[in-house]
């Protein structure tokens, strides 16, 4: 919820009306942070997931990947709203770190 409120208020405060990555932060956190764990809870009803060795690995990897992705989306979105031109190195760094977050999130989903 904080992502959506921040997006709305930050863009309004800075009089920004274009599209930005900040608009997708709320949806990413909502889907990846809540819906996935609701599915895990549903699976727990049928299968004793605590007995699965990969579940603990899933939790660690997934809970590193999702926040890392979200944080880099915040960083990129703030730069877009403020109109800050990034150097090629800074742009590649943000993209690379976000990519690592996406890879960890995807790996976590595969482990699940």
Image (cartoon, helix red, strand yellow):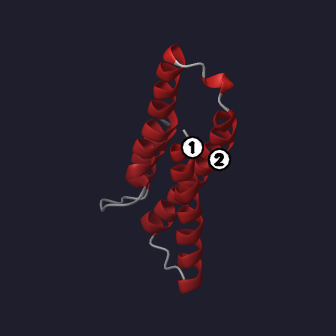
In this image, 53 relative to 99: left or right?
Answer: right
Q: Residues within 10 Å of mark 1 (few under 14, many from 20)?
A: some
**Residue in the foreground of this view, choosing between 97 and 82:** 97
The mark nearer the N terminus, 2 or 1, is 2
Disc 1: which residue: 111
Q: Position of residue 39 (x, y in %)?
A: 46, 27
Q: Position of residue 70 (x, y in %)?
A: 54, 51
In this image, 54 relative to 70: left or right?
Answer: right
Q: Residue at x 49, y 79 (%)?
A: 85
Q: Position of residue 75 (x, y in %)?
A: 55, 61
Is 89 above or below relative to 7? below
Tell me whether circle 2 and circle 1 mark residues in contact (CB < 8 Å). Answer: yes
Disc 2: which residue: 61
Q: Residue at x 39, y 50 (%)?
A: 24
Is 83 above or below relative to 15? below
Q: Residue at x 60, y 66 (%)?
A: 97
Quarter of the view holding residue 50: top right
Is 111 above or below relative to 42? below
């Amino acid at each position: 919820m904080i992502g959506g409120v921040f997006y709305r208020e930050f863009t309004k405060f800075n009089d920004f009306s274009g599209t930005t990555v900040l608009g997708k932060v709320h949806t990413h956190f909502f889907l990846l942070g809540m819906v996935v764990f609701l599915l895990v809870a549903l699976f727990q009803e049928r299968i004793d997931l605590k007995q699965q060795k990969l579940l603990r690995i899933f939790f660690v990897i997934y809970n590193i990947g999702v926040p890392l992705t979200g944080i880099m989306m915040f960083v990129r979105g703030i730069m877009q709203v403020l109109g800050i031109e990034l150097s090629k190195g800074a742009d590649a760094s943000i993209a690379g770190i976000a990519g690592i977050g996406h890879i960890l999130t995807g790996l976590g989903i595969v482990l699940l």
